[in-house]
Image: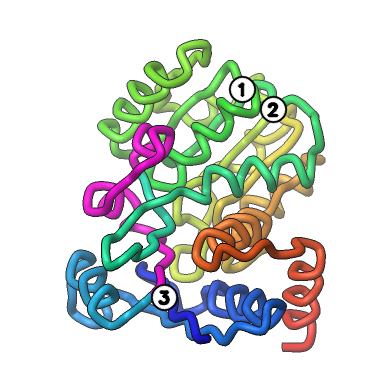
Amino acid sequence: MTLRFGLIGDNIAQSGSPELHKQAGKLHDIAVTYDRLAPRQIGSSFEQVLENCVAQGYRGVNVTHPYKEDAARRVMVRDPSVRAIGAVNTVVFDAGEPVGYNTDYSGFVAAYRHRRGRSETGAVLMIGAGGVGRAIAFALASLGTKDLRLVDRDIDKTKGLMAALKTAAPDVSVTICTDVPAAARAVSGLINCTPVGMVGHPGTPLPDQNMYGAEWAFDAVYTPVDTAFLMDAKASGLAIISGWELFFFQGLHAWQIFSDCPCDADVLRKKLLRNEETS
């Protein structure tokens, strides 16, 4: 049996998703093909690429920046919590019909617990309210966050996310902020959910002098793993959760949805890290 998967997104040349799914397949003696599908690069729209995947017999696709919210509008979403998030990063073609899931949500919860155990999140500043930001905001609510501060250059995105959270998690106090340094005061967690820091988008969304006093930081970017944001956070004494952790757990959960095969997380983690060390 061969399972055919793909990743739809921009700036995905260095994505580790193909290797993750191929290694997961090997653990179950399942052959896997996994294609990178960049709409802008191939001159197609997201909708066209998705339709081509159905026609070409793909089992499913992962979706990344900037198409997660678009995906939620174009596929069937059965889970009401995913509908509330309004973003989809995993699509399975069930009898040809695209069905959407969000493993960024479950992946962040798993990544947080893996690195910080049962520690409370405290107040959190999250920069970026796009697709991955929406998933992580809902994940923070499930982790018990009561004070969430949102920053995004697109004010409509922050307003939309705040409204969605107020409906789904009314006990969370959500504040829209425009002054990032001011918003970082007296928070425990600092989160980057923007593309800033990834390959092709150098920089950091928060100056290091504004990190002191926080306890932990997370960066959704994982190419590279050691972003300027996380290195500044580490130098400032914060515990860090890398984007690789989210990449790993969202990929693990996506594999289980795609294949209906449970996968030993520890074994898969060791295989991936070993391969990265030798590459």
Instruction: For marks 1 and 3, give the CA distance.
Output: 34 Å
**Which mark, by number, is residue 145?**
1
Instruction: For marks 3 and 2, give the CA distance.
Output: 34 Å
At which x and y percent is residue 269? 76, 67
What secondary structure is marked by label 3?
A: strand
Crowding near pointer 2: few (<14 within 10 Å), some, many (20+)? many
**Labels 1 and 3: the sequence-earlier one:** 3
Identify the residue position indicated by label 2 in the image: 121
Q: Report the quarter where the C terminus lies.
A: bottom right
At which x and y percent is residue 37? 35, 77
Magenta segment:
59-86
Crowding near pointer 3: few (<14 within 10 Å), some, many (20+)? many
**Labels 3 and 2: the sequence-earlier one:** 3
Kindly identify the residue that appears in the image at 37 percent across and 32 percent down: 84
Amino acid type at mark 1: Thr
Q: Quadrant of residue 118?
A: top right
Q: Quadrant of residue 267?
A: bottom right
**Labels 1 and 2: the sequence-earlier one:** 2
Instruction: For marks 1 and 2, give the CA distance.
Output: 6 Å
At which x and y percent is residue 241? 71, 48
Asked if the residue under mark 2 is in contact with the one under mark 1, i.e. CB atoms within 8 Å, the reply is: yes
Query: Between residues 278 and 175, which one lies in front from this camera angle?
Result: 278
Say if 269 sits above or below 25 in the image: above
**Side of 157 where 82 appears, left or right:** right
Identify the residue position indicated by label 3 in the image: 6
